[in-house]
Each structure stands twice: as structure tokens, then as C-alpha cells.
Image: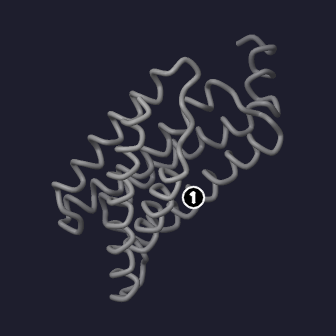
Amino acid sequence: MNTKILKQFFSTRNIPNLITIFRILLIFPIIVFLEINFKSFVWFFIIIGGISDFADGFIAKKYNLKTSLGATIDPLADKIFILIPFTWLCINQIIPFWSFSIIIFRELVITSIRNSKRHGMPAISIAKYKSFFQFLALLLLFYPYENIFIFDIGIISYWISFLLCIYSSLIYLRFK
């Protein structure tokens, strides 16, 4: 492979993209640990994914390292990272199928609308709150120790994220 291409890919300009790719790769151990029901490892990888999500965005904004690749893969990484554990929660009847289906539908439609804009469309602030509550729900619902209070707060966080999902969809559709 051309060393110029390698230098360009691994340059400081692409550090946020590399962090995002790392987050995408984290989903594979999450899938394995979900399959064998090792929730403590899933919880650990969710924390690492959350930290990496914060880090790539922080670095890209602080050092003005935004790229078109990053604008494409970061939202994709977010969707993958949230929807796969939600799928497990649905299969295990922790969250209802109907609400999960609406979330998937929303993510596909809104992501398509946002990506159809010439340079993408930034996430609105309410959608950032939605993502926060989705992450919080995962963090609490996969908490590795038996604690009904934490589990209940996780369920509440899921429903808050669901309501924000509906609300943000209406806002995006209004601005379409």
C-alpha cells in the first residue's frame, strides 16, 4: 500500500475517524458477549463506546478536524452501537417490540433525510438528548449487578429516549 495514503489515513486529521472506527469494531465483542449472556462485559464495552463517542466528537470540534467521512460514519457508529444492544433487549422481552420497531423506523428515515442534504444535516439538540437517554438506558439495563432500582431507572431512561425519538422525528420532518 502507498505510504502516502497510510500517512494521510493515520494523520492527526483522522484521529476522530479512527476513534469512530474503533467504536464500530467494539460492537463485535458486544455481540459475542450478548450471545453468551455476559452482561458485565457488555456493560464494560458500552462504557468504552460512550467514552469513544464523546472523545471523537470532542477532538473533532476542539481541533477543527471535521471530515466528510466522519460526518458519515459517526452517526452510523451511533446507530449500530445503540440498536444492536436494543435488539437483544427486545429479544429478551425487556423492551417491547413495537417501540423498538418505531425506533428503528425513525433512525432509518431521519438518517436518510439528514444524509440527503448536500453536506449532511447536523443533529438537532433534542436528538442529542435522545442519544444520551438511549446510552443511559443501555448503561443501566446492562448493569452487571442485580439492582431493581437501577434497572427501573434504565427502563424509565428507555421510555424518555423513546418519547424524544418521536419528538425529534417530528422536528426533523418539519424542517425537511
Residue at the outermost top position:
2
Q: Specify whether 36 is left or right of 114.
A: left
- Bin the neighbour count of mark 1 within 10 Å (Cα to Cα): few under 14, some 14-19, many 20 and up: some
Residue at (75%, 11%) from the top-left corner? Answer: 2
* Rendering coords of residue 147 (x, y %): 37, 88
Q: Which residue is mark 1?
A: 50
Label 1, secondary structure: give it: helix
Nearest the eye: 130 or 143: 130
Q: Quadrant of the C terminus?
A: top left
Q: Residue 112, located in which quarter of the rendered image?
A: top left
Q: Residue visible at 59% across and 22% down?
A: 119
User: Residue 99 location in percent, x, y?
Assistant: 22, 56
Label tally: 1
Q: Residue at x 38, y 74 (%)?
A: 154
Q: Residue at x 29, y 49 (%)?
A: 103
Q: Quadrant of the N terminus?
A: top right
Note whether 170 is above or below 142 in the view shown. Answer: above
Rendered location of residue 153, percent (x, y): 39, 80
Is 169 drawn above or below residue 98 in the view shown? above
With respect to residue 66, does 133 lie above or below?
below
Where is residue 148 drawn, in percent x and y?
A: 33, 88
